[in-house]
Amino acid sequence: MENQGIKKSGCNLIAQKNVILKLNLNYFYKLKFYFIILFTLICFAKFSNAQNFVTPENLTELDQDIKETSGLVNLNGEIWTHNDSGDDPILYQINASNGNIIRTVEIANATNEDWEDITADENFVYIGDVGNNYGDRTDLRIYKISRSALAASDEVYAEIIQYSYSDQTSWEINHNNHDFDCEALISFENNLYLFSKNWVDHQTRCYQLSKQSGTHIAEYQSTYDIECLVTGGEILKAPNRLVLIGYNSNGGSYTWIFEGFNDANFFSGTNTKLIWTSLTQIEGVCQANESNKIYVSSEEISDVLDPTLFFHDVPGDTTDVIEQNFQKFRVYTSNNYIFIEPDSEKSITADIQLLNTSGTVLYKKRFVNESQVQVHTNVSNRIYLLVVTTKQGTNTYKIVL
């Protein structure tokens, strides 16, 4: 896909009157970040209990050769990624601790028209050349590669799965203004599943596709109003949970978790939306070595953010997220200090972070059994993001001095 510009991380209130930049979104998505957009704060205008916020761990910057990382897959503890359109047809094994490239493997009979996601089953790896920004592609395909060949050689050949969507009837050019783009691919049981990136209505449609080489129809299954542009997918094991990541045109980045579904009816169970507090352009996701954790990659935002690998928990029972995050705080300011007090008789044991409007962490400290926390804002900013993380969850506050 093309670079999207800086996403203003936020929630539904992000488009309030304090946002003064009005962007032409088509132009915004098309440019390679020639301008910088003010990072708008992600929380409510008044402090609140933000029970579904998540602050992923920033593990490491990624090597510049993979600055447009677009998919992730975990192959027996080895983390692999690829770039999107314009790169050679190469897979990169990376070190999740330092972001260095360990190995590269070229797909000899492939081209990278617009690689957007990667997935695997026990025997094969599947690379989705499925990006379709203009809506006019008639050469959508999946490259199917033997895992044993990938392990043994630095040059492999792929089987090819060509496909079209069962409900697409027009292939006229309509740049970033249609609903037949795709950036999320998963393997589940005997089939592949694609999740559309709907530019128009910010929903996602699920399609089922054969794993056999040849030409096939991706059959429409169901639709979910996911309220964002889906950019990656993964199936977590034991129990089966579908993870979709993405962002919306207001700038929010999200992890969606779907669980309790029957067969491949992914949207039939319960779901939870986790709102990121980080400034990102998230693109790839895969399960980490622990069953309840995921890696997420973010591509480069020119002159602002390096390509980055993130790490965060996925609650084992996401239906309990709201009930778990119950603790509230009283937050107020005086003489360039921010005061935090428990909204009850309890003391505060928490990790406190203060961020500026560029997403830079200005202050970070852990407090144990404190009746009151004082944070001095010894910088000239007027607007801050205060993140208070306890064992119950994360509370996020907008601070205006």
Image: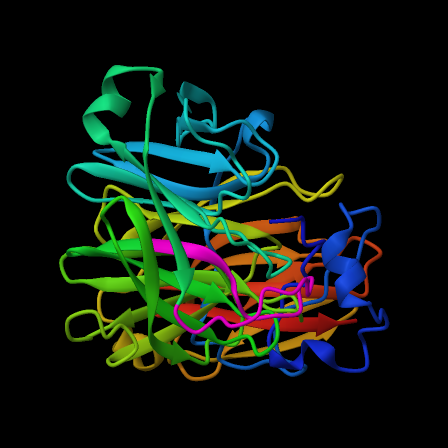
Q: Is residue 173 magenta?
A: yes
Where's the C terminus, which quadrant? bottom right
- Main SS, magenta residues: loop
Measuring from the top left, give residue 267's x and y in whole percent. Answer: 30, 77
Q: Would residue 305 appear left or right of 273 to someone viewing this image?
A: right
Left or right of 351? Residue 122 is left
Closer to the camera, 340 or 401? 401
Q: Residue 278 in the image: x percent, y percent? A: 57, 56
Report the residue at 66% width, 81% height from top.
13
Find residue 145 and report its horizontal and vertical position in percent: 28, 33
For residue 52, what is the image quadrant?
bottom left
* Frontmost residue, 246 versus 128: 128
State which region is magenta.
Answer: 166-185
Q: In the rendered structure, does residue 23 fall within the stretch colored magenta?
A: no
Q: Residue at x 63, y 49 (%)?
A: 361
In which quarter of the view is residue 86 placed? Answer: top right
Residue nearer the viewer, 19 or 113: 113
Q: Is residue 318 above or below residue 35?
A: below
